[in-house]
């Protein structure tokens, strides 16, 4: 006989997974269960379903698993809200001042992600105990290893030095011995890759249930992990990129092979905007490799809605009253979409002037990413944006731009945009999409000094961008904007020039998808880029007066103080004099 609590121990010592207990109480009797009761296909598959569910139900507005709350550290976005005190802990992240190990938001995302790992490990334990009568045993184990890798990946991007919980048979006493320094940075990435390599060998090309990962989804994830791993940061006294590993880059090339994705039917959407539409015909499209599945019709009051973006809806009077207007696109990001007389980005001087819609050419992705005064919000001409409180709760402190990719047309209220405690949507959140695969492959080629191959791949993204005008085709005539986006000339390029193009294209293509800050850290560019950004922003807004990115500190968050205390000091604090 085994006590059920052994199955639901939280990954971090002292943090019990109460959410797992709630789920189990609905499925099994309280008290103890025999191995025969636990290790049945029916029970095990319910555990698997629960492991999937927690990635939608455990996040909330302050701890979105998209990590948008933490991307406000980048040059893509302002925190937003009404004042700097509205979500003050995220203001501290934005200006990189006052971030403390005791900040509640850091412990919040830590606990939620480790509770997710706990739920996954409980499912792995149950499935492993099943015999051959569980026909899908191997596939379910592969799916669970994928999910566990995802939670560890998010934690590692945030905190760098984390405890890895990969043994599903640990006792409570075993948990008390776990450290967050068992693995070097490089070894930690390999732990995540090992979970995924296991899954890759088993997962099928297609899945009937769209929320389950496929072989291509796992390949995309592996490529991302090896790309992070390639930028070695194993100096214990710094977060500097000390070398770039070619073997890891070759792994990126291997797992971004187009043949892998063709077999699963994956490709670029004809229009990038199709990835960010809530209607059922656009969900799980050809570019969506793996997405968190949300819904509005599952028999509960609010369905399985995405409340992780609950703070970003604008506060349109008498329409979306209660919208909190967080995560607002920065002027710096808007300027990056300007194009020159050849239809290409200003790689070195994009921020030399502010975008002027009457004078400047722009990449069409600008109008699919950022809502700006004078243009329709969510492409609905009934909601023309202006410089009023509808579009800035802060009265312009954070500007009047609004993010578009994760918001929903107000005309769809009560269909795909639903008011609960906060605004929520049933639109899926794409975690891995094929455009990212192409750009990861381009980056690997650029770093391997194959600039010509890298630029060919960048051109695939730019060509799709140029044709992404289905919802904005009337903008030039009706609103006076100038849309102009062209490919680069093909040929040979130096490593330096190719990397500039790749890095800019990642920013433009993945803008407001919570990748930017982590890219800057991975490249070793964060200190230079963000301090230059702060210097300009100080002239626009006084909230940046004290902003400063401190190298070898601000690349990663401090380990939450409560977790160090609960670990009997087995967890060591990150460097940086926190």
Image (cartoon, rainbow, N blue to C red):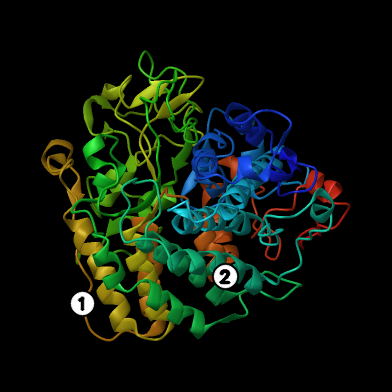
Q: Which residue is drawn at the image coordinates 27% and 51% (left, top)?
A: 365
In-image side of 452 versus 106 (left or right): left
Q: Quadrant of residue 92?
A: top right
In-image side of 293 versus 259 (left or right): right
Nearest the viewer among 135 and 527 is 135
Looking at this view, name the residue that lies furthest to the top: 318
Q: Residues within 10 Å of mark 2 (few under 14, many from 20)?
A: many
On the image, the x and y values in percent for residue 403 come to 39, 39
Disc number placed over residue 109 in the picture, else none: none
Q: Quadrant of residue 502?
A: bottom left
Disc number placed over residue 524 in the picture, else none: 2
What separation in Å lies between label 2 and label 1 (alpha carbons)? 28 Å
Q: Are marks 2 and 1 in contact (CB under 8 Å)?
A: no
Nearest the viewer among 362 and 552 is 552
On the image, the x and y values in percent for residue 524 come to 57, 70
Residue on which the image places disc 1: 489
In-image side of 458 versus 564 (left or right): left
Q: Is residue 136 above or below residue 297?
A: below
How many numbered badges does the structure rendering display? 2
On the image, the x and y values in percent for residue 518 come to 53, 59
Does residue 91 appear anywhere in the picture?
A: no
Q: Is residue 242 above or below residue 91?
A: below
On the image, the x and y values in percent for residue 520 come to 52, 63
């Amino acid at each position: 006989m085994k006590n059920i609590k052994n199955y639901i121990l939280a990954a971090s010592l002292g943090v019990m997974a109460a959410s797992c207990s709630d789920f189990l109480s609905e499925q099994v009797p309280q008290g103890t269960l025999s191995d025969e009761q636990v290790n049945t296909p029916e029970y095990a598959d319910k555990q698997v379903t629960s492991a999937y569910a927690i990635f939608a139900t455990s996040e909330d507005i302050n701890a979105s698993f998209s990590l948008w709350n933490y991307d406000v550290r980048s040059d893509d976005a302002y925190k937003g809200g009404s004042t700097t005190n509205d979500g003050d802990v995220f203001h501290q992240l934005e200006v990189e001042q006052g971030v403390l190990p005791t900040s509640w938001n850091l412990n919040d995302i830590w606990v939620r992600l480790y509770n997710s790992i706990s739920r996954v490990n409980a499912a792995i334990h149950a499935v492993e105990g099943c015999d051959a009568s569980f026909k899908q045993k191997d596939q379910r184990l592969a799916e669970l290893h994928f999910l566990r890798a995802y939670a560890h990946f998010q934690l590692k991007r945030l905190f760098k030095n984390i405890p890895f919980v990969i043994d599903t048979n640990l006792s409570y006493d075993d948990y008390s011995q776990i450290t967050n320094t068992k693995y070097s940075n490089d070894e930690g990435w390999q732990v995540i890759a090992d979970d995924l390599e296991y899954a890759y060998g088993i997962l099928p090309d297609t899945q009937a249930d769209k929320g389950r990962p496929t072989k291509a989804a796992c390949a995309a994830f592996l490529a991302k992990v090896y790309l992070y791993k390639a930028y070695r940061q194993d100096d214990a006294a710094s977060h500097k990129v000390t070398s770039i590993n070619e073997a890891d880059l070759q792994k990126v090339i291997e797992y971004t092979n187009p043949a892998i994705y063709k077999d699963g039917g994956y490709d670029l959407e004809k229009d990038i905007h199709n990835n960010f539409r809530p209607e059922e015909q656009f969900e799980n499209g050809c570019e969506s490799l793996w997405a968190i599945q949300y819904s509005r019709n599952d028999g509960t009051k609010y369905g399985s809605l995405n409340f992780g973006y609950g703070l970003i809806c604008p506060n349109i009077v008498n329409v979306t009253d209660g919208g909190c207007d967080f995560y607002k696109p920065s002027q710096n990001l808007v300027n990056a979409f300007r194009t020159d007389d050849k239809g290409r980005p200003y790689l070195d001087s994009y921020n030399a002037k502010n975008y002027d819609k009457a004078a400047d050419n722009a990449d069409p992705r600008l109008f699919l990413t950022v809502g700006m005064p004078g243009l329709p919000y969510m492409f609905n001409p009934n909601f023309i944006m202006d410089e009023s409180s509808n579009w800035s709760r802060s009265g312009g402190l954070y500007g009047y731009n609004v993010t578009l990719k994760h918001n929903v047309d107000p005309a769809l209220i009560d269909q795909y945009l639903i008011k609960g405690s906060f605004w929520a949507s049933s639109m899926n959140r794409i975690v891995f999409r094929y455009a990212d695969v192409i750009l990861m492959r381009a980056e690997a080629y650029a770093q391997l000094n194959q600039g010509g191959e890298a630029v060919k791949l960048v051109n695939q993204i730019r060509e799709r961008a140029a044709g992404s005008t289905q919802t904005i085709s009337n903008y030039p005539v009706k609103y006076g904007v100038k849309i102009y986006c062209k490919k680069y000339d093909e040929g040979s390029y130096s490593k330096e020039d190719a990397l500039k193009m790749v890095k800019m294209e990642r920013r433009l293509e993945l803008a407001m998808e919570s990748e930017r800050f982590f890219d800057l850290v991975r490249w070793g560019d964060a200190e230079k880029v963000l301090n230059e950004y702060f210097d300009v922003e100080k002239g626009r807004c006084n909230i940046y007066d004290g902003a400063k990115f401190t190298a070898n500190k601000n690349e990663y968050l401090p380990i939450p103080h409560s977790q160090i205390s609960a670990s009997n000091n087995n967890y060591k604090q990150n460097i940086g004099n926190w």
